[in-house]
Amino acid sequence: MDGKLTIGELAELFDVSTDTLRYYEKAGILSSHKNDDNGYRYYTYEEIIVLMDILFFRGMKLSIKDIKQIITKMGIADIKKLLYQNQRVVEDRIQELIKLQKTITQVVSHYEQCEQHVGKFSIVPAPDFKYKLLGKQADNLVAIIRKYKKENWDWLDSIRYTLLIPQEDFLKNPNFSSAQAAISIDKENLYMLDLAEQQELASLPEAEYLYTIVQTDYFEQDNDALGKALEYLKEEGRRVSGPMIGRYMASSHKDGLDFYEIWIATNSH
């Protein structure tokens, strides 16, 4: 080898492409020599050491700009400061990924619940969330987004889009045509709202509730699942004693369907 490597030999040694080595040269962070006899590039021991540092710092996700500063201008103290700044960036990214993992886990859970509970009925206690009625569904979606949006999209799964159907309307027409828009939020997420907004929220009355998950395209004359819910209550010797409230869970855009988990206040005859 006589202390020299061609560009192909250097690329093979470090498992990088020759284009990458040329890019590093163009960026001014790696040098090469030219063989006077054949015009080919070659690299000496010094360039190999520099390339090892380049790859080391690239492995820490430092930019080419920062690496150029390290190689051409920075002493130990400045390099340490730069690495410390990068460490803080990485720590912030880790927290973002943890938050993203939590969100994905929660959304996957929603889809699993939709698969497992559509059309299945159970009697449960009052749900542990608070809600605020806003008005007609179509007129308020944009207003909800404008009022409650945050700097990121995490709020979409914390401040849940919610529908409420008054008891009389629900008994007359068990579908979503008379649904009114609302927002709801679990009690552990109330901190996302200021105190005045928190005071505008109401809890569902303490009672027993029929719980299920239904799908809707909002246009059906009768929602099959809601009709079956009323039949289930009748068979169980129960009657509806309050509005139906539903929280958005997921969408199947291919089918034009939205999924809601719903609660219907009920008591025995």
Image (spheres, rainbow, N blue to C red):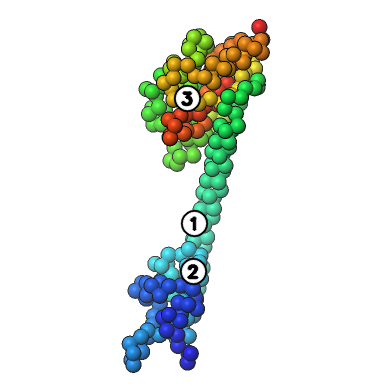
Three-letter code, disc 1: Val
- Residue at 40 percent across and 85 percent down: it is 42
Query: Is there a contact, CB below 8 Å, between mark 1 and mark 3?
Result: no
What number is the disc on residue 89? Answer: 1
- Residue highlighted by disc 3: 216
- Asked whether 138 or 58 is in front, the reply is 138
Three-letter code, disc 2: Phe
Spatial separation of the CA atoms under disc 1 and disc 2: 15 Å
- Residue highlighted by disc 2: 57
- Residue at 49 percent across and 56 percent down: it is 89
* N-terminal-most mark, 1 or 2: 2
Please rate how many residues cluster around mark 3, counting C-alpha atoms within 10 Å: few if below 14, some from 14 to 19, many from 20. some
Three-letter code, disc 3: Thr
Residue 198 appears in view: no
Query: 109 above or below 213?
Result: below
* In this rendering, position of residue 246 left or right of residue 233: left
Question: In the rendering, at what x and y percent does residue 56 appear?
Answer: 51, 71
- Asked whether 200 or 30 is in front, the reply is 30
